[in-house]
């Protein structure tokens, strides 16, 4: 299963090599040209005569980076991307290419004072325990600058749902791979970018080199359809199809493009929804600002609990995102 393969692969920001190798192998028979630039972005080109279109997904996931050693053999660490400190305590992680297991530790609640119990635990009050007894022992097996990711495996979950790690944005990567398997009239670039979670860095480079007319970001986006959340705060809902964004922190999405995508969804009977939030940002924020600029839109698979150790998504939403994007690209 393509999504399973992508979500179980390791690829925090700056360390996307394992994901990149999977994607290159999956798309090699469906595109005219594949290039990997100096940043590590994959640029896959399907030549055409219509407008120059970039469809983007980012390969990286949120994770951690090792920054120091404690005297007792535990590790100090920081964030790679936006991981809320509230969700990190007691999670199992894998460190570096050797996938060395560790546990994110903190002071137990029994020993916390009143103020500590009320506040989120900051990164500098946590450590990664690898079972070492000394700083010297730890230095032999973990180097400064190594990455860590959550140790979560992909699996099916409930009725038509899946759970796993890195749905933001391996869902988008899987959608883009499926898109590239068909042919279109437009001059299509399927771009798998690096380092989105730390500021859309890969997208600035790839978009500058391509100079597209249209850019569409494929994402795994925020979803909060759960008890206690008011309806107006439910940015998206699982099972209601791909989410078409209005705006976010880095982009105001082009009405012409979003209206055309919605029209295709309605004509083809494809479930869809509007993303009813403006929080966050993605590679579209980079794509529309380079060169002469580009018209941009974002289409996303709703994912519960993103930027944490596990996410939940609907296979129907994923499949409808693939259908919608294929049908829309055929209109160009």
Image (cartoon, rainbow, N blue to C red):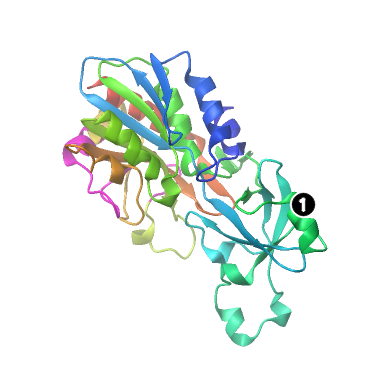
Percent position of residue 182, x then y: 38, 16
Question: In screen coordinates, is 122 left or right of 112?
Answer: left
Figure check: 292 above or below 74: above
Magenta span: 236-261
> Residue 242 lies in magenta, yes or no?
yes
Figure check: 29 above or below 205: above
Looking at the picture, tell me which residue is in the foreground, 252 or 69: 69
Percent position of residue 331, x then y: 23, 22
Callout 1: few (<14), some (14-19), or many (20+) C-alpha neighbours within 10 Å?
A: few
The residue located at (29%, 31%) in the rendering is: 209
Figure check: 323 above or below 15: above
Percent position of residue 187, x then y: 27, 20
The answer to which quarter of the image holds residue 89 is: bottom right
The residue furthest right is 133
Residue bearing the label numbered 1: 140
Work out whether residue 143 can be spotted: yes
The residue located at (27%, 27%) in the rendering is: 53
């Amino acid at each position: 299963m393509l999504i399973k393969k992508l979500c179980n692969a390791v690829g925090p920001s700056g360390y996307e090599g394992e994901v990149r190798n999977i994607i290159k192998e999956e798309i090699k028979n469906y595109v005219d040209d594949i290039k990997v630039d100096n940043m590590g972005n994959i640029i896959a080109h399907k030549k055409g005569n219509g407008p120059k279109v970039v469809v983007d997904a980012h390969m990286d996931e949120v994770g951690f980076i090792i920054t120091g050693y404690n005297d007792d053999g535990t590790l100090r660490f920081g964030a790679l991307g936006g991981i809320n400190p509230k969700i990190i305590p007691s999670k199992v992680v894998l460190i570096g290419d050797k996938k060395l297991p560790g546990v994110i530790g903190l002071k137990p609640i029994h020993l916390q004072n009143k103020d500590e119990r009320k506040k989120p635990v900051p990164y500098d009050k946590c450590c990664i325990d690898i079972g070492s007894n000394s700083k010297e022992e730890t230095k032999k097996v973990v180097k400064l600058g190594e990455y860590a990711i959550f140790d979560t495996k992909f699996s099916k979950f409930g009725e038509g749902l899946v759970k796993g790690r890195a749905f933001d944005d391996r869902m988008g990567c899987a959608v883009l791979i499926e898109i590239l398997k068909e042919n279109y009239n437009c001059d299509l670039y399927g771009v798998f970018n690096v380092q989105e979670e730390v500021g859309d860095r890969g997208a600035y480079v790839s978009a500058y080199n391509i100079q597209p007319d249209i850019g569409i970001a494929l994402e795994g986006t925020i979803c909060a359809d759960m008890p206690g959340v008011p309806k107006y705060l439910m940015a998206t809902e699982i099972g209601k199809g791909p989410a078409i964004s209005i705006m976010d922190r880095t982009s105001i999405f082009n009405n012409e493009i979003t209206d055309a995508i919605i029209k295709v969804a309605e004509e083809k009977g494809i479930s869809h929804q509007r993303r009813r939030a403006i929080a966050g940002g993605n590679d579209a924020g980079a794509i529309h600002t380079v060169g002469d600029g580009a018209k941009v839109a974002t289409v996303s698979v709703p994912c519960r609990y993103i930027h944490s150790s596990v996410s939940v998504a609907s296979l129907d939403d994923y499949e409808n995102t693939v259908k919608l994007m294929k049908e829309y690209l055929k209109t160009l």
